[in-house]
Image (cartoon, helix red, strand yellow):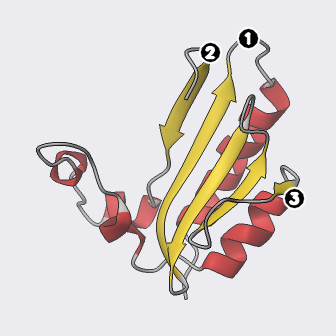
């Protein structure tokens, strides 16, 4: 990540509403959001994000990527069809307000996706 990028990690609303505690996601060295995504549907999330940004080639099979690594991008981490994490990076040198609006709007349906 470059210093001009602001990164957010999306969490499912249903996990938060069920009493999920964000502080439980942090370990000694890092954080892991995979436990929050037990009901995340990879195909549905891919479809929704694909309507926001263009897909790009990823360097890993467990990673689906949209946008541009150098500016704004969204990365879906998945393993065997199960969501492991969803990360959004915004380029603060040239803030893309429409993208920010799309991400905020899409976050609710993504978070509520059922398998």
- Residue 29 located left or right of residue 36: left
Q: Name the foreground residue: 104 vs 86.
A: 86
Q: Going from the N terminus, do you reach mark 1 or mark 2 first? A: 2
Q: Position of residue 62 (x, y in %)?
A: 56, 71
Question: Are the residues tagged 1 and 2 within 8 Å (C-beta)?
Answer: yes
Residue that badge 3 annotates: 51
The crowd level at tag 2 (other Cα within 10 Å; few <14, some 14-19, many 20+) is: some
How many numbered markers are drawn? 3
Q: Nearer the viewer, mark 2 or mark 3?
A: 2
Q: Secondary structure at mark 1?
A: loop
Residue 50 in the image, given as x and y percentages of width and height: 83, 61
Q: Which mark is residue 93?
A: 1
Image point (25%, 59%), residue name: 20
Q: Is residue 59 above or below residue 73?
A: below
Can you tell which mark lies on residue 4?
Answer: 2
Q: Residue at x 45, y 61 (%)?
A: 12
Q: Residue at x 18, y 42 (%)?
A: 29
Badge 2 or badge 3: first in the primary sequence: 2
Q: Position of residue 91 (x, y in %)?
A: 70, 22
Q: In the image, 44: left or right of 77?
A: right
Q: Nearer the viewer, residue 74 or 105?
A: 74
Question: Which part of the image, by quadrant, shows the N terminus?
Answer: top right
- 96 versus 65 height, above or below: above
Q: Residues within 10 Å of mark 3 (few under 14, many from 20)?
A: few
The local secondary structure at tag 3 comes to loop
Instruction: Give the distance between the C-alpha atoms of the residues marked 3 and 1, in whole angstroms.
Output: 24 Å
Distance (Cα) linking label 2 and label 3: 25 Å
Mark carried by residue 59:
none
Position in image of residue 79 (x %, y %): 49, 78
């Amino acid at each position: 990540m470059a210093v001009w990028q602001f990164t957010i990690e999306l969490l499912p609303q249903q996990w938060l509403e069920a009493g999920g505690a964000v502080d439980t996601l942090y370990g000694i060295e890092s954080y892991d959001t995979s436990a929050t995504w037990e009901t995340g549907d990879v195909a549905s999330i891919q479809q929704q994000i694909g309507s926001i940004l263009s897909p790009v080639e990823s360097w890993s099979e467990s990673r689906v990527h949209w946008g541009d690594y150098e500016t704004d991008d969204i990365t879906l981490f998945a393993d065997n069809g199960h969501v492991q994490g969803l990360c959004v990076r915004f380029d603060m040198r040239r803030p893309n307000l429409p993208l920010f609006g799309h991400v905020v709007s899409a976050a609710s349906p993504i978070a509520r996706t059922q398998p």
